[in-house]
Amino acid sequence: MANGAGVREQTLVLIKPDGLSKSLTGNILTRLSETKLEIAATKCLHVSRELAEEHYKALRQKPFFEEVIKYIMGEYHPRKKVMAMVYVGPDAIQKVRSVTGATNPEEADSVTIRGQYGRITTKGVYENVIHASASLEEAEREIKLWFQPNEIIYDLYPTKEIEVKEKKRVWAKGPNSAILSTPKFQSSTKKTKA
Ligand code: IDP
Ligand code: MG
């Protein structure tokens, strides 16, 4: 559970494909900025079936599971992607959940993000434009699922170093952003005051 006592927490936020397709990114970020929390990581990505099923594995037995998987993969929307973010700060989980609103957009308070922008489709999917972690445990699992340690500006959870031999795609010409994931960058961020 979230501790709700002003303790620093982190939470995963996803702007779902309906939010991106309806060009609501700015509106949603503005609403989230009311929390005064800090963004510690952000990226856009296509969601694979594997990632979608792992993210929603607690819902595997639900009758709407397949629809929710297709929804988060972008199969119902022209912008087949998700914007993933990590928000950090006091009571982050509860603060983001409260501005997000209830799961069912018809039941969500009309001043919340889901109440303002969500809808239920004719197929019965709750298209509620945003995901937010519901507990400390869920936040840890989800942040580790959606982000690598080097993609987050703070060391939120313990890490270890492993040797990997991998083929990597880099820019064909010009400066190489591979420098961003070198240990030098990491150690300089460790010194950053949170
Ligand atoms: P949450 O997103 O508020 O944490 P969860 O129960 O974790 O709610 O459900 C994950 C997502 O699955 C919801 O955001 C919504 O898109 C979808 N969903 C949940 N319950 C239903 C339902 O009863 N019918 C249709 N879709 C649902
Ligand atoms: Mg949930």
Image: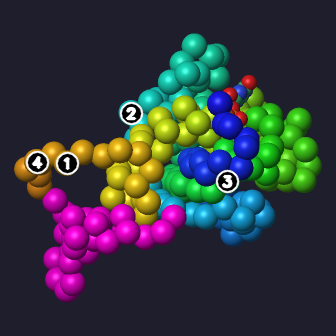
**Quick check: marks 3 and 4 in contact, CB under 8 Å?**
no
Which residue is label 2 attached to? 50
Q: Secondary structure at mark 4?
A: loop
Which residue is label 3 attached to? 90
Whichever of callouts 1 and 3 sits on the residue coming sooner in the sequence is 3
**Quick check: marks 4 and 1 in contact, CB under 8 Å?**
yes
Any mark on residue 179, and which?
Answer: none
Camera-nearest residue between 71 and 13: 13
* Residue 121 appears in the picture as rendered: no
Callout 1 crowding tier (Cα within 10 Å): few <14, some 14–19, many ≥20: few
Q: Which residues are magenta?
A: 168-194
Which residue is label 4 attached to? 163
Residue at the image position 56 percent from the left and 33 percent from the top = 138
Q: Is mark 4 within 8 Å of ligand 2?
A: no
| Left or right: where 173 falls relative to 31 | left
Mark 4 to mark 1 CA distance (whole Å): 7 Å
Front: mark 2 or 4: 4
Front: mark 3 or 2: 3
Q: Amino acid at mark 3?
A: Pro
Which residue is label 1 attached to? 161
Mark 3 to mark 2 CA distance (whole Å): 32 Å
Residue 45 % position (x, y): 44, 55
| Left or right: where 48 falls relative to 186 | right
Which quadrant, please, contains the N terminus? top right
Q: Amino acid at mark 4?
A: Glu
Q: Secondary structure at mark 3?
A: strand
Mark 1 to mark 2 CA distance (whole Å): 25 Å
Specify the quarter for ligand 1: top right
| Left or right: where 58 falls relative to 150 | right
Q: How is the image coloured?
A: rainbow
Residue 69 % position (x, y): 54, 33
Callout 3 crowding tier (Cα within 10 Å): few <14, some 14–19, many ≥20: some
